[in-house]
Each structure stands twice: as C-alpha cells, then as structure tokens.
Amino acid sequence: MNQRRDKGRKPQLIIAIDGPSGAGKSTLSKALATTLGYTNIDTGAMYRAVALLATRQHTALDDSVALQQLCRQMQFEFRRVADSDHVFINGEDVSDAIRTPEVSLLTSKVSACPAVREELVRVQQQMGRLGGVVLEGRDIGTVVFPQAEIKFFLSASAEERGRRRFDELRAKGIDVDLQQTIAEVEARDAADSSREHAPLRRAADAIDIDSTIMDIQQVLALMLETVRARMAQA
C-alpha cells in the first residue's frame, strides 16, 4: 500500500483514533486524513474483512490456526474511488459486504482471537511506520502505535451510537429495528471491553472527545485544531 506523502506538510505524524463501535471513528478518520493529505487506515474494516472471508469459507471462528492462515493469505488495500474510501481484499471491493449487521456481530469474535490480532497488527504497523497516517480502531493508541504523536478517544452514548447505526443501515435499504440495533451496540461494547487480548481501552495520554451532541464537522474541527497545534510545536 502506497502512502500519500505531502512534502509541504511536516512532520508526518501518526494519529490514532480509538473508541467504541458507532462513535464516528471511521467517518472522522477519513475526513481527518483527507484534510491533512494523510493515508487513512481503517483497522476495523480489516477485522470485518476477516470475519467476512471466514464466513464465506466456512472457517470456524474458534479455530485460531485456520484464522491465522486466512489472515496471511489476505491482501489489504485502501483505495479512493469516486471521492470515497473503499476496502479491497484480494482485489475485491468489500466495502459494503463488511458493513452488514451479521458481519458486525461476528467481528467481535474474530478480533478476540490473539492470532488474528497478531497478524493484523503486524500489517498495520508496516503500513503506518513512516507516519503521515490516521488509524482508527480500538487498540491503536495502546497496542498498535503506543508511540503515536496524537491519540484521540472518541465516544458517544450507546443510544446515540445505535441510532446512528440504525440510520446508516436504513439508508442502505437494510430492514433493521432501532432497539435491536442499540442492543447490538451494547453487546459489541461488552465483548470489546471484556476480551482478554487487547481489549478496548483508552490510552492514558489520549484526548477524550464525546460526540453524543456534536456533529461530524464540530468534532473534525476540534481534531484539526489539536493536530495543527502539535505540528506547530514540532
């Protein structure tokens, strides 16, 4: 994966955005990366892709050896298509396929597998080692890049995150129930926070942003203010 480099922007920082499902991490990571001319690495999409392929290939989610082998055979690419970020796995655009409710629920099981996390963390570190990247996930600032120059922890209430997810799925023509969607968000929170390996956790030096009553542009402006202040210091 080629990283976009802008010689006019120095230094090239590693920016981590962590937080629970539905907090707006993906949208803000893309927006922040686009504004800065950085590469956006959607780590959550990588785990979703593993869950998708495991389902397609009938790989048992408790078979760590098979899941590790599956990861090693996957080629990840994040590509800009018609002003939108797309996820390609082995040359296939899986951007929509990895966002279904079924894949969302399976992703927690896949991401709890130490072998999967080991393989994907290695890929993520390789992608971001030179800087000029924005990575979002649940353990970027604590596990993947604890040395990241800027760390954000983005949150929102479970009810608000469930509503956002509900609206997103309905807009795609998927028939979902609001209360069930909120319950699924809460279940995902519990699974991500209680897993033994690399649980969802706020880095001690992360900047907290609660987006419950903030829109995307307000959060983006706050993030940009922080990044530009850090660049000026550097």
Image (cartoon, rainbow, N blue to C red):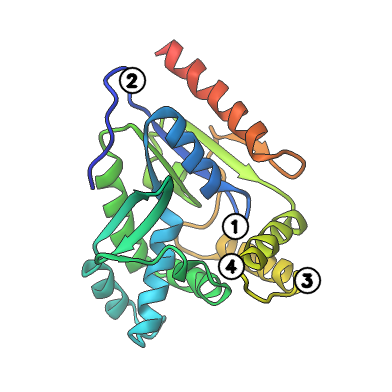
Residue named by callout 3: 179
Assess disc 4: are there few (<14), some (14-19) or many (≥20) residues with their C-alpha within 10 Å of its C-alpha.
some
Q: Which mark is residue 191?
A: 4
Q: Position of residue 179 (x, y in %)?
A: 78, 71
| Secondary structure category for the residue under label 1 | loop
Q: Earlier in the sequence, mark 2 or mark 1?
A: 2
For this rendering, which residue is in front, 31 or 229?
31
Which of the two discs, 1 and 4, sits closer to the camera? 1
Callout 3–callout 2 Cβ contact below 8 Å: no
User: Amino acid under label 3?
Assistant: Gln
User: Amino acid under label 4?
Assistant: Ala
User: Amino acid under label 1?
Assistant: Ser
Assess disc 2: are there few (<14), some (14-19) or many (≥20) residues with their C-alpha within 10 Å of its C-alpha.
some
Assess disc 3: are there few (<14), some (14-19) or many (≥20) residues with their C-alpha within 10 Å of its C-alpha.
few
Q: Is residue 120 above or below residue 63?
A: above
| Secondary structure category for the residue under label 2 | loop
Q: Position of residue 93 (x, y in %)?
A: 35, 64
Q: Earlier in the sequence, mark 1 or mark 4?
A: 1
User: Amino acid under label 2?
Assistant: Pro
Q: Position of residue 39 (x, y in %)?
A: 35, 39
**Is any part of residue 112 visible from this angle?**
no
Residue named by callout 2: 11
User: Which residue is drawn at the image coordinates 55% and 49% (left, top)?
Assistant: 201
User: Which residue is drawn at the image coordinates 58% and 41% (left, top)?
Assistant: 153
